[in-house]
């Protein structure tokens, strides 16, 4: 039950006009910065007379994204993914499918029962080492976690009967989640393994994703076409990938979207609030009810991340090129140039973003957000752990939740503990803005959750590495931008290390920003205050760490294997005046940034890196023959207030030989002779028909309504024993019957059942008239052993291998080729944008100038 009283209200600040005119200085002030560190978010109410004119062009239009609230809850989505994947697995094994949950008696002497989700049971056992490592004490602890008597064996029996074989299959494939990807431009149904489109009669289509595979290209080649459902590894294991659906064919004006929101709110109030007026508190409770609901079709629209670059469509604040404004009017001029105008804030006095070499849409150029009732922004931190400022121009209250940076690690640990398998598949899940966890769950786990109610003409500021989320209580118009202050510096360095672990792209080059701070200081003349000196000293420490690391990498690299080139980086001069009116080429800036990233780890290439000759298109990421030296990524930087360390846990791999039974996976192989009998070939055998009859009988016995709390779940052990007997009988009789049926499958190409069912599903599906269509979820995937391992690795590198030159940071080069650089293709280049001696000169000059100031 949602209880707002357990949350902490954020500080509400009322700066004077003088304080408000210098935002970076005000927010950096010791007492204000202390509030930011303690609470994570603060609300700023401008002086009463600060009322900027809303200045969006009448031509402004935007797309919306569709958000199905029940898909956003971490537990809900994980349970749904697990059910879908395990049911595909069970269909291939000709076993009955599972619902989301079953009911178990609390104790032997009571009829009271609790709902147990299969996914939750899977996670609980997995955390204890899997079924193989379970004992009486561990099962007792699992029982207690679900509120069941420690002596009960219901959970153990249920797991053994329905989850165990799939869990073994998952564990055998848990070391990598990269799978062959289909080519959107492929018109020939090319096999995803070999890439050829020959032998159409020997090609299978996955019954979920429709991707084609040659039967003899599978890990265990098939000789005949399965008569039952067949799924690829990707759809059996799942990737946990999820994204919002965008209405790409529809654009709304503000007036049109406002009317749509009014109609939606009227229907919502009537349907969900007994036609009574809504308050923010009522909306808040209902919002979390919908997020945590296992079954809900409620879907809302959100105009999020709008970044139009036409004059009058960049920002709601007045700009020099905004159509229809009088730029000569003193009042208009005041708001155009005010540092709290979000087009100006990133470059206000004191913001370290003044030192980056490029403009970044959504970071230094505002993005617009047009909300509707219950539309949401999910838990996330800002890029490079920067600060953010969000301003509400008009409309309904925007509700914010924030977690102080001191508890960011606790929050990350809780999220990963709640859905560990999902984070294995999506390591950067918390950067995707698609996941919610209730504040009540945070409070329950000792994590402080701060809230803010943002109303028109108010700012909400998030401090470095503060996870935040929220929702809109109705139609509103907001915009947001990033900025930095001196206290951010070490957080920025930490973000680079954290991003490297999960392969998240850098948005800007942190170390060039640091270099620019030092160069600016070395050119500076006149008096320098203590705050600036402190910034320079900390920047110098960061830069020395990085230069020392690069030198260590260079000293261990066999440079004789490379052609060495010196090519200084040339940046186009930034034209801040053009940027302020949106006159910059976003695509050109994006291309420059992409070229500057390491092709493997996605961090910025700074000063020295390798360009691998890939004209033969055979680049592979491999384990090096000579291990790289034990050099840390970066010495742990000093972080103001709190330092957060991200741990990278090695993923346990269970080999196929460790699986419990021969039929625990559709792809079990060598250790078991019986497993070589193709289960798909058994589909038309007599024993299979008996199994199907038994399955139908069992399904009819176990039909129940999910919402009925009194419904009973029948014991399955006896029935599962019958299943196992039938499977064994099927295997014993398979050899003879396969010979009789040999050749039948070769005369036809199997059609995808999913394609055949699509029209029927479309006709059956009936959407509520007051809500838009349900968004689709996306899936990508994982990895196998043997032949498929190489294939999936090949698929993973396919995009890279289209390049004739691969750019690698020094660390990735050492990881891939070792210190001896064996296997480096001839013609590869070690490129120097700056020599180590040049970087050392910057360091020496900075130290010399600091020393002179201290005299």
Image: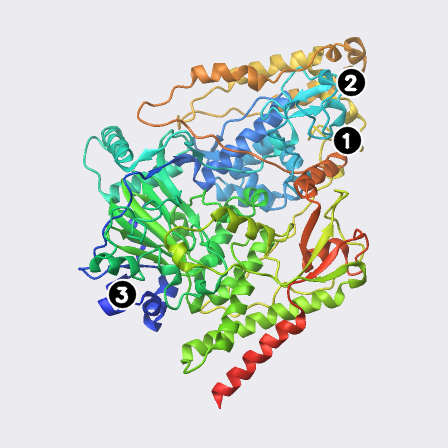
- Judging depth in this view, the residue of 714 and 550 nearest the camera is 550
Q: Earlier in the sequence, mark 1 or mark 2?
A: 1
- Judging depth in this view, the residue of 716 and 804 nearest the camera is 804
Q: Earlier in the sequence, mark 3 or mark 1?
A: 3
| Residue 235 placement, left or right of 743 | left
| Residue 537 placement, left or right of 290 | right
Whether residue 814 is visible here, answered yes or no, is no
Element at badge 2? helix
- Judging depth in this view, the residue of 211 and 220 nearest the camera is 211
Label at residue 669: 1
Element at badge 1? loop
Q: Residue at x 65, y 15 (%)?
A: 691
Q: Spatial distance from mark 3 to mark 1, Cα to Cα?
A: 70 Å
Residue indicated by mark 3:
20
Q: In the displayed image of the protein, which residue is found farthest to the bottom?
A: 855
Q: Residues within 10 Å of mark 1 (few under 14, many from 20)?
A: some
Residue indicated by mark 2:
732
In terms of image quadrants, where is residue 847?
bottom right
Q: Residues within 10 Å of mark 3 (few under 14, many from 20)?
A: many
Q: In the displayed image of the protein, which residue is found farthest to the front?
A: 328
Q: Spatial distance from mark 1 to mark 2, Cα to Cα?
A: 17 Å
Taking 366 as reference, is 153 above or below it? Answer: above
Whether residue 300 is visible here, answered yes or no, is yes
Q: Earlier in the sequence, mark 3 or mark 2?
A: 3
Please name which of the two marks, 3 or 2, marks the residue nearer to the observer: 3
Q: Residue at x 32, y 56 (%)?
A: 460
Element at badge 3? helix
In terms of image quadrants, where is residue 293?
top left
């Amino acid at each position: 039950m949602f209880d707002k009283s357990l949350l902490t209200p954020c500080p509400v600040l009322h700066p004077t006009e003088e304080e408000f005119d210098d935002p970076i200085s005000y927010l950096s002030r010791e007492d204000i910065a202390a509030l930011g560190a303690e609470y994570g978010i603060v609300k700023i109410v401008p002086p009463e007379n600060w009322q900027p004119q809303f200045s969006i062009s009448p031509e402004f239009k935007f797309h919306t994204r569709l958000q199905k609230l029940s898909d956003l809850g971490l537990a809900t989505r994980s349970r749904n993914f697990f059910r879908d994947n395990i049911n595909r697995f069970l269909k291939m094994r000709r076993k009955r499918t599972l619902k989301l949950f079953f009911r178990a008696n609390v104790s032997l002497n009571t009829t009271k029962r609790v709902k147990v989700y299969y996914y939750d049971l899977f996670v609980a056992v997995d955390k204890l080492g899997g079924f193989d490592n379970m004992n009486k004490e561990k099962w007792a602890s699992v029982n207690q976690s679900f509120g069941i008597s420690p002596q009960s064996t219901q959970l153990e029996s249920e797991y053994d009967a329905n989850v165990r074989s799939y869990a073994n299959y998952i564990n055998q494939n848990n070391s990598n989640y990269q799978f062959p990807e289909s080519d959107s431009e492929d018109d020939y149904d090319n096999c995803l393994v070999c890439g050829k489109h020959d032998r159409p009669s020997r090609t299978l289509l996955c019954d979920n994703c429709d991707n084609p595979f040659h039967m003899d290209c599978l890990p265990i080649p098939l000789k005949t076409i399965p008569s039952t459902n067949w799924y690829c590894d990707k759809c059996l294991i799942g990737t946990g990938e999820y994204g919002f659906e965008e209405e790409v064919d529809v654009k709304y004006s503000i007036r049109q979207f406002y009317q749509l929101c009014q109609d939606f709110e009227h229907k919502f109030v009537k349907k969900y609030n007994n036609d009574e007026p809504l308050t923010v508190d009522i909306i808040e409770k209902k919002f979390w009810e919908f997020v945590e609901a296992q079954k809900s079709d409620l879907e809302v629209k959100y105009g999020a991340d709008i970044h139009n670059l036409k004059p009058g469509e960049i920002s709601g604040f007045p700009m020099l090129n905004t159509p229809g404004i009088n730029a000569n009017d003193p009042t208009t001029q005041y708001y155009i140039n005010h540092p709290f105008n979000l087009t100006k804030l990133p470059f206000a006095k004191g913001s370290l973003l003044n030192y980056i070499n490029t403009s970044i849409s959504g970071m230094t150029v505002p993005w617009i957000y047009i909300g509707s009732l219950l539309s949401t922004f999910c838990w996330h931190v800002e890029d490079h752990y920067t600060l953010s400022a969000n301003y509400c121009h008009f409309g309904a209250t925007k509700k914010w939740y924030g977690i102080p940076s001191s508890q960011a690690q606790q929050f990350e640990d809780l999220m990963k503990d709640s859905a560990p398998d999902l984070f294995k598949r999506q390591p950067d899940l918390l950067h995707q803005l698609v996941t919610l966890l209730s504040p009540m769950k945070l409070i329950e786990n000792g994590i402080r959750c701060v809230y803010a109610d943002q109303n028109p003409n108010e700012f909400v500021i998030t401090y470095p590495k503060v996870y935040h989320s929220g929702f809109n209580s109705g139609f509103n118009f907001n915009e947001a931008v990033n900025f930095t202050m001196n206290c951010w510096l070490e957080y920025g360095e930490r973000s680079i290390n954290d991003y490297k672990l999960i392969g998240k792209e850098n948005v800007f080059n942190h170390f060039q920003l640091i270099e620019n701070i030092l160069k600016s200081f070395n050119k500076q003349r006149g008096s320098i205050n203590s705050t600036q000196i402190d910034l320079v000293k900390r920047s110098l420490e960061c830069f020395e760490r990085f230069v020392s690391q690069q030198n260590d990498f260079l000293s261990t690299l066999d440079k004789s294997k490379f052609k060495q080139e010196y090519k200084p980086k040339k940046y186009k001069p930034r034209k801040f005046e053009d940027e302020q009116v949106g006159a910059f080429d976003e695509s050109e800036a994006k291309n420059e940034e992409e070229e500057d990233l390491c092709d493997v780890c996605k961090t910025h290439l700074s000063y020295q890196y390798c360009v691998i000759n890939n004209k033969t298109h055979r680049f592979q990421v491999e384990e090096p023959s000579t291990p790289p030296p034990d050099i840390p990524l970066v010495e742990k930087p000093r972080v103001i207030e709190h330092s957060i360390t991200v741990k990278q846990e090695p993923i346990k791999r269970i080999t196929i030989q460790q699986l419990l039974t021969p039929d625990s996976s559709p792809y079990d192989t060598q250790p078991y002779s019986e497993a070589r009998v193709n289960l798909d070939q058994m589909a038309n055998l007599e024993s299979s028909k008996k199994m199907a009859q038994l399955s139908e009988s069992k399904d009819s016995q176990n039909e129940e309504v999910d919402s009925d709390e009194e419904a009973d779940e029948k014991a399955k052990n006896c029935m599962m024993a019958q299943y196992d007997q039938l499977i064994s009988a099927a295997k014993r009789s398979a050899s003879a019957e396969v010979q009789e049926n040999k050749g039948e499958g070769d005369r036809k190409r199997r059609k995808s059942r999913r394609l055949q069912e699509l029209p029927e599903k479309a006709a059956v599906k009936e959407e509520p008239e007051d809500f838009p269509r349900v968004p689709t979820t996306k899936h990508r995937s994982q990895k196998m052993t043997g032949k498929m391992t190489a294939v999936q690795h090949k698929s993973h590198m396919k995009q890279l291998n289209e390049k004739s030159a691969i750019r690698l940071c020094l660390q990735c080069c050492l990881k891939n080729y070792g210190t001896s650089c064996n296997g480096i293709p001839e013609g590869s280049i070690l490129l120097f944008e700056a020599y180590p001696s040049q970087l050392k000169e910057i360091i020496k000059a900075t130290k010399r100038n600091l020393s002179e100031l201290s005299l």
